[in-house]
Amino acid sequence: MKHCSVPLTLGVTIWLTVTGITVSAQQAQQLLAERERLDRTLWQAEELAQHYEQRFVQLWDELLRSDAKYQILKQFPLETLALGDADAVEVEFLDLGITHTRFGQPRRELATAEWQALLEQFERDGYVIDQTEWHHSRFEPPEGDRPARSEVSATIHAARAQPAHRVILQATLDVTWSLRVDAQDIPIPERIALSRLDLLGRHAPAAFEKVFEVERLGTRFPILPLLVYDLDGDGLSEIILGGRNLAIWNRGDGQFEAEAFLEDGTDRIFADAAILADFTNDGHVDFVGVDIERYPLLFEGDANGKFTKPGVRIADVTFEQPKSFTAGDADGDGDLDLFIANYKNAYEGGQMPTPYYDANDGYPAALLRNDGGGVFTDVTEAAGLVPKRNRRTYSSSFVDLDDDGDQDLLVVSDFAGFDMYLNDGHGRFTDVTDRFGENRHLFGMAHTFGDYDQDGALDFYVIGMSSTTARRLESLGIGPEDKPEHNALRAAMGYGNRMFLRRGNGYELASFNDDVARSGWSWGTSTFDFDNDGDRDIFVANGHLSGGSTADYCTTFWRHDIYTDDSQDDASRETMFQFVMSPLQDTAISWNGYEHKVLWMKMNGDGGEFTNVAYLFGVAFEYDGRAVVTEDLDGDGVVDLLVAEYKSGGGSGDDDDHRLHVYQNRLAEAGNWIGVRLDDAAGGFWTLGATITLESAAGTQVQRLVAGDSYSAQHSASAHFGLGEATAVGAVEVRWANGTVRRIERPEINQYLRITPPTDPN
């Protein structure tokens, strides 16, 4: 078997000549030569794994490009397919008519003609293959007489129109490779055994239907942040696209009207992060964002939800790349303080986050104390937040994590995981992150809150990158000997998402965390009860950069990039990065591309655990996702879904495109419900920090209103509770952040309660 490639050093010489780049060219060639040497020695087994992987890369690419998916699958070179015995099939009936079929161990051997006949039968039954995924997660090189072996995770989504039936086929493929190769030198499998084969099905059409989308429309600025808020107080939330300075007014009956959001007469651009909250304590929501001059500006809102006054600089602190805003009364003085955190792009200038598992080398975050009158003071140092203020942060929230009545802080960062700080009630924070050990390590992208085990206590879910390459390298057991900690934390960093459940006075990793860990390269997330059955479901938007091929840059990242260990700019490294990433920048390859979105549904009939049912309900979109917000836009009692798409155009980035997709929830089987909408009111009764508790015969449900969760997004000031078949609730209680409580006994269900603070706090 031969495996040839153009030497990197020769390739970079040609590339440098063509592009005219001469700065530090010699040093860049030396760096590339060292990478090439390591690929021939240290990473030889991984290089071989990628060679075998080409069989499934080719298959996935062909399936993406062609409508003749059955023909492509039938032409896949394979001698024997092993399936579970038909007599060993187990069928479980789950919520909403979902069936879960588990097949037994692979004891039935099918020759080529036999498994092709199964595909033909599936096609005759009217099923159209919609989407697929193929991930090479484990590899054993050949040794002696033993052939090479692989483990491949496969997913197939298919649907039939009449009668309506949507299915998810998930399988673990144990591949035994032959010694044969095709004309392109790609290895051919000898035998594939389906060691795990599961079939999820539902006899119904998709429950979510797109009602409209918003494109970027030719501007080089993004549409994000995505903010949802009832600006005019009519009970229906508006959609605000901060990067576009666009407000999409919700007029009811499915009618929306777009106009400029800020009306100060200037072309304001707020990219990626901003927040809506009452910072002036007048009972009207204000808008704070960082403009292109890097200063935070406050735009005061009026009683009609309009922002007509010019923006006012609220602090002399500058922010290079703000990605997260959150607000809360951190010091307990009766007004909303503001925490703004930055990201810092890797690779730019030739630098990389260092170390890749605990980087604190980005642009500084700041805690801004609200002094009233639109004036804020940087109190980051006094608050005890300086040591880790240089995280490369994507999301953060003020939230009461220990139920002591004050606003604690959760910060989620790429190349670090998450940090948790407890508040002493006066704005001084204590770092308690270390009690989570390795469970805190991940490529942190976003977070969301919910009571996932239905014990009446608030839990949290942190999402990050789950990496097939990292799992494969772990199976091979290879890595540089002089980087033991880098190697030791590879499994944790590539593991994916973490769910932490409240236990006593702290949090612990959920026993079922494996069920919700591996959703892909996850960006935005939101907790909601999409079927109104009384438990919390989770939507996750995945996919980083999808290109012309599913060939993945991720393996380069794990072999070389994470070991760079230098966050200082370096011209030679920058040139080297530009060369190795040029296929990605030109969209020839992908980086965790074509990953489908995930809907973790809490299954009461499946041990109370979570199952990904996204395709069954029509939300397993293939585009690269970013921000996510869940909101009942039409007030019909079922929660809708908003997802921002990112599409890379390559090159300079001017062709990059953002789109907002809005999907209406039309699930016919949704249960009863009750909702709560809060209004900002003067005197410290803000929606942020409020806790809403529902008491019923089925138990207690709790939600907290926060900002900074999901990714580059903000949810509305409302809470929605599913009730299932219940026809009554005992009480709804609202506890504002200042400790004031309002309780409503036995409210009517299937409506939104509009709750205002009591006129007399006593």
Image (cartoon, helix red, strand yellow):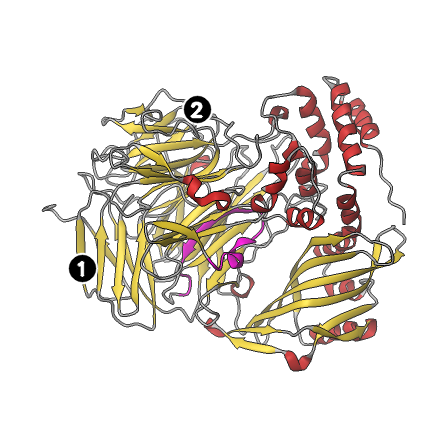
Instruction: Classify residue 81 by image quadrant.
Output: bottom right
Q: Position of residue 236 (x, y in %)?
A: 32, 52
Mark drawn on residue 733? none
Residue under numbered circle 2: 294
| Magenta range | 511-531
* Residue at point 29%, 28% (across, down): 369
Q: Is residue 333 magenta?
A: no
Crowdedness near tag 2: few (<14), some (14–19) or many (≥20) residues, C-alpha within 10 Å: some
> Does the rendering let one see residue 72?
yes
Q: Is residue 248 left or right of residue 687?
A: right
Crowdedness near tag 1: few (<14), some (14–19) or many (≥20) residues, C-alpha within 10 Å: few
Mark 1 or 2: in front is: 1
Under mark 1, the amino acid is Ile
> In 3D space, how far apart are the residues under numbered discs 1 and 2 (Cα atoms)?
45 Å
* Residue at point 61%, 70% (across, down): 199
Q: Secondary structure at mark 1?
A: strand
Whether 720 is drawn above or below 571: the answer is: below
Q: Position of residue 739 (x, y in %)?
A: 19, 45
Under mark 2, the amino acid is Arg
Q: Secondary structure at mark 2?
A: loop
Mark drawn on residue 744? 1
* Closer to us: 406 or 270: 406
* Residue at point 65%, 43% (across, down): 591
> Does the rendering let one see residue 226?
no
How many discs mark residues in the rendered view?
2
